[in-house]
Amino acid sequence: MTREIDIRSLDFSEWVRPGDTVTWGQYAGEPVTLTRALMEQRHAIGGRFSAFIGATWSDTLHPDFADTVDFCSYCGTAGNRHLAEAGVLDILPVHYSAFEAALTQGPSRVEVLLLQVAGPDNEGRYSLSTSHEYLVPLIDTARVVIVEANDQAPWVYGKRMLHASEIDIVVRTSRPLSDPPPMQPGAVEQSIARHVAARIDDGSTIQCGIGTVPEAVLAGLCSHRDLGIHSGALCDAVAQLMRAGAVTNARKSIDRGVTVGGVLTGGPTLWEFAHKNPAIQLHATGYTHNAAVLASIDQLVAINSAIEVDLTGQINAECAGSRYLGAIGGALDFMRGASQSRGGQAIVVLPSRAGARSRIVAQLNGPVSTPRSDAAVIVTEHGVADLRGLTLSQRLDAMLAIAHPDDRDNLERAVATTVGAARRERPL
């Protein structure tokens, strides 16, 4: 039976047991009132417990809290970075499409689910607001569901609504959502966006990853028409494209007329636009990242970023040296889906340099997040390298052409250790 209580009366020691895993929504979907109370009461649990966290925008979590809490995430982005740098963040290295299985069974099974919701409406239903994705299956499998019903959270339509019978505790609040970090695309990002825009036809359906470069790419599509959106993440640029008439979803082969996503990663502009807007609908990860679903979408264009790409097309989206900064995430799910889509293409975007360091490299400095067998279109500010169907030596030429001009000689000299003697004697 659902209990409605004040946050000051919520005793987490009644609901969280030592050894439990607790999780909650990421980005603006974090139920901050609940997570702050949980961290404040962490010692009362009576033993160590785990917190599986997504990308964090709030200041709720601190490395000192690892005295009792084992922090785990799929990513080292946003506010997770200070946990990673302090050495108190473990990583669950799975694709987004595998989250449902990972979090509902096995050693990472979630026992306590904390949600931020909007509502209820006249029918007693709560909206999951800004985040569906991997939270949806947990509603049915978690031992405990505690919700923060925030009257400032946008009501966003989704395939799953929450009913009172599925909730153990409701805490009512009224607070602003956590704001996203600022993104200011510069000249490099704008140049990349122009290269990508030239490759996208009207009527394409777009998936776009997270970050300054993908956001700039989406913002550069305002002159396109009848675009569709099917993406894990929906950013502010999605609202701008829908308002401008560039995104109508009118030519999508599935979910026609509707922008489909898993989580809102934008700020107030997107929240206001998505509030009670039936043209935007959120789904669970099991749908947004499903291989068969993606393959059924004609002209699916997957746009994702990377930390570095080597000369043969291997992609590192996770680590810069020893620092875990990114994620495996859903990039490969969408890249493979786009490769199976009729008329689809997978595009990876990145600046050619980070400071004075080349991001086009002879050898990756981190893990292979995407193997070269999943060849993609690689775009920097210096141009486009379409690696699909190219041999290793052909890829080298294509990748050198989009590296920073000041790095090309050094990369060429490193080629011998990358693909062997056959390349070594080739003239510059």
Image (cartoon, rainbow, N blue to C red):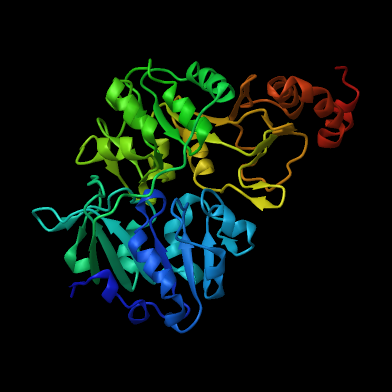
* Vertical position of residue 115 compared to residue 404: above or below: below
Count the numbered circles shown: 0
Nearest the camera: 268 or 287? 268
**Horizontal arrangement in the rendering, residue 241 relative to residue 334 (left or right):** left
Residue farthest bottom in this picture: 46
Percent x, y for residue 200?
Answer: 46, 20
For image coordinates 73% across by 41% down, the residue present is 364
* Vertical position of residue 156 compared to residue 383: above or below: below
Percent x, y for residue 312?
Answer: 72, 33
| Residue 152 in view of the camera | yes
**Horizontal arrangement in the rendering, residue 62 relative to residue 37 (left or right):** right
Nearest the camera: 254 or 72? 72
Nearest the camera: 259 or 252? 259
**Horizontal arrangement in the rendering, residue 248 relative to residue 4 (left or right):** right
| Residue 302 in view of the camera | no
Percent x, y for residue 230?
Answer: 37, 36
Quadrant (top left, top right, bottom left, bottom right) of the C terminus:
top right
Residue farthest left in this picture: 122
Q: Quadrant of residue 192?
A: top right
* Vertical position of residue 117 compared to residue 11: above or below: above
For image coordinates 24% across by 30% down, the residue present is 257
Percent x, y for residue 261?
Answer: 35, 41
Quadrant (top left, top right, bottom left, bottom right) of the N terminus:
bottom left
